Amino acid sequence: MILSRIILFPYWLALRIRNARYDSGRRQAVQHDVPVISVGNLTVGGTGKTPMVEYLVNRLKEEHRVAVLSRGYKRRSKGFHLVEADDTATTAGDEPLQIKRKFPDILVAVDKDRNHGVEQLLALPEAQRPEVILLDDGFQFRKLKPSANLLLVDYNRPVFDDELLPFGRLRDLPEQIRRADAVIVTKTPTLLDEYERGQMRRKLHLRPEQPLFFTSIQYDAPKPVFPEQADMRYLYSKEVLLITGVADDRPLLVQLSDRYERIDHKRYGDHHRFSRRDLKDLARYVRRNPRTLLMTTEKDAMRLLHADRLDAEVRRRLFCLPIEPAFPGWEETREFDALIQGVLPK
């Protein structure tokens, strides 16, 4: 612990100085003429940003023109890009493509420079121009001042128990949690008593006025990645191969362990680009295991969807398991919705 702090001191100091410049006003952040709701975290992946963005899209799209703006992590395209449903993860990024395919009627855009991305969205014709923009992973982009900063924290890794990269998973100082307009603890157990809630608030060092919410993971029914080629009979198999390239696949493994007698697992790094060798390994696996279902995450499905030379038998058996955040009760859901409505146009 002491050694890591010594080694990371230059990184810690750089973050401290950068944040202090914005906090003091010496560096100005741009506030746009449209409500911008940022969904972010302090760690590298795995807190459930994309499911929370999708939750907000679902709550807002009936009454407002909604746009989602993302960096488009690991895409190969440059600059501003409006995502289309027939894009690939290579041009759009896996998470923006997932959102666009799930909500084809909303605007989804990618741009590393979020201020430029917002400006491009606002330059669209009036009939298309968004009334609210959801900023995916915007907490560290301090050049933009959002209307609401939602910060997600993994229940299993409170930020004050973590360390900066590469010794931990923090990419910003944990004290920055004070900038959040609301903190959402994700992946919580479904039964969480008031004492445990209070303990989490203390662990996170929240100010008294900072709202704290809790969500658990709710799984939907498996969906075929290739609907026209899928063999739905494999859903009745008791054997499954889980294919993951995400930051945290532990909750999914727990979910599958309740249903399947045998679980094999091919684990890759977050946002992994599947190589020809990976695809050949999958083809060999299905030939050796004729009864096994193949399961993956929605995010991984976006990268496998346009993978070259994906075996036909893999396509027949490949399903993904959609997830969404669930608040513990109606009262907390209503309180969260009220917070969001407070920054929207009337």
Image: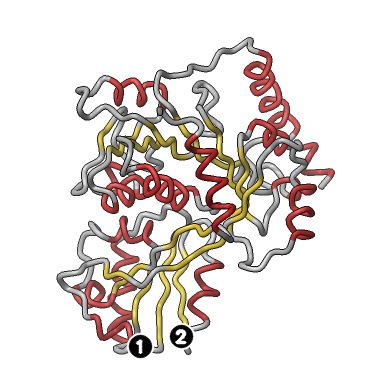
Mark 1 Cα within 10 Å, few/some/many (few <14, many 20+)?
A: some
Asked whether the beta carbons under mark 1 and mark 2 sit within 8 Å of each other, the answer is yes
The one nearer the camera, 172 or 65, is 65
Q: Secondary structure at mark 1?
A: loop
Asked where in the image residue 237 lies, by quadrant, the reply is: bottom left
Residue 250 location in percent, x, y? 56, 67
Q: Amino acid at mark 1?
A: Ser
Q: Amino acid at mark 2?
A: Tyr
Kindly give the residue lying farthest to the left in the view shown: 228
Residue 27 location in percent, x, y? 59, 12
Task: Give the residue displayed 68% in from the left and 55% down from the top.
Answer: 157
Q: Which residue is mark 2?
A: 260
Mark 2 Cα within 10 Å, few/some/many (few <14, many 20+)?
A: few
Relative height, residue 96 to residue 269 (above, below): above
Relative height, residue 298 to residue 238 (above, below): above
Q: Secondary structure at mark 2?
A: loop
Q: Which residue is mark 1?
A: 237
In this picture, residue 239 sits left or right of residue 337 = left
The quarter in which the C terminus is drawn is: top left
Task: Give the residue displayed 50% in from the left and 69% down from the top.
Answer: 252
The one nearer the camera, 226 or 209, is 209
The colouring scheme, among rainbow, by chain, secondary structure or one colour, is: secondary structure
Residue 8 location in percent, x, y? 73, 36
**Mark linked to residue 153:** none
Task: Give the residue displayed 33% in from the left and 43% down from the top.
Answer: 61
Task: Give the residue displayed 46% in from the left and 62% down from the top.
Answer: 268
Asked where in the image residue 70 lies, by quadrant, the reply is: top left
Residue 16 location in percent, x, y? 71, 25
In this picture, residue 179 sits left or right of residue 313 = right
